[in-house]
Image (cartoon, grey):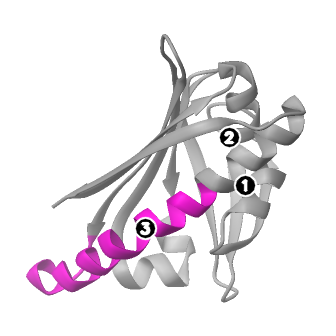
Amino acid sequence: MATITATRAMDAPRETVWDVLVDPDVYEAVAPNLSVVEIVSGDGAGMVRRCVDTNGNAWTETVDHWDDGHQFGVTVDVADSEFHRRLFDRFDGRWAVEERADDVLVTVEFEYETKYGPLGWPISKFFQYKAPGLVAEIFDGWEAEIAERLGNQVAGHTDEATASH
């Protein structure tokens, strides 16, 4: 299993950051690789989202963990996605906000298992190379949305990205 984790410290109220992170319309607008993000059913744990990437590949993901105001996790229905089923046996994501003394730490984490045993290593390495840049763009978009909602600029930020295999 491989993991990619990216974090950014944001100078904004945790509640505002959370509201932006869980808004599917905002995620659709800020994720450079997605053209559609919509809630199919439910809310909180058990919610099903449908995503479509910019190449037209669609998939559903189910929220398997929801700690309102703090974190949520999704499991991609790999069998339902032409893109994912070709490359991955499993693909999960987690989004979290943690209030700290001077800021809010936002974490985005992806855990996945590639197909093809050792031959899947290049797939994993490519994803580890590509994902941090995509997540940085998402962070930038979230910060812009937070600033708009607060009517000001969000103060500086600090990024960190790690990958393990």
x and y, in percent, of residue 6 in the image: 40, 49
The reply to whether discs 3 and 2 touch (Cβ–Cβ < 8 Å) is no
Q: Amino acid at mark 2?
A: Leu
Q: Quadrant of the C terminus?
A: bottom left
The reply to whether discs 1 and 2 touch (Cβ–Cβ < 8 Å) is yes
- State the residue position of label 2: 21
Q: Amino acid at mark 1?
A: Tyr
Question: Which disc, if any, is residue 136?
Answer: none
Q: CA distance from mark 3 to mark 1?
A: 15 Å
Q: Quadrant of the N terminus?
A: bottom left
Q: Which residues are magenta?
A: 114-138
Q: Secondary structure at mark 1?
A: helix
Name the residue at the left extreme. 118
x and y, in percent, of residue 90 in the image: 35, 62
- State the residue position of label 1: 27
Earlier in the chain: of badge 1 and badge 2, it is 2
Residue drawn at 58 percent across, 39 percent down = 156
Q: Amino acid at mark 3?
A: Ala
Residue drawn at 70 percent across, 74 percent down = 52
Q: CA distance from mark 3 to mark 2?
A: 17 Å
x and y, in percent, of residue 125 in the image: 24, 76
Please state the total of marks drawn on the protein image.
3
- State the residue position of label 3: 131
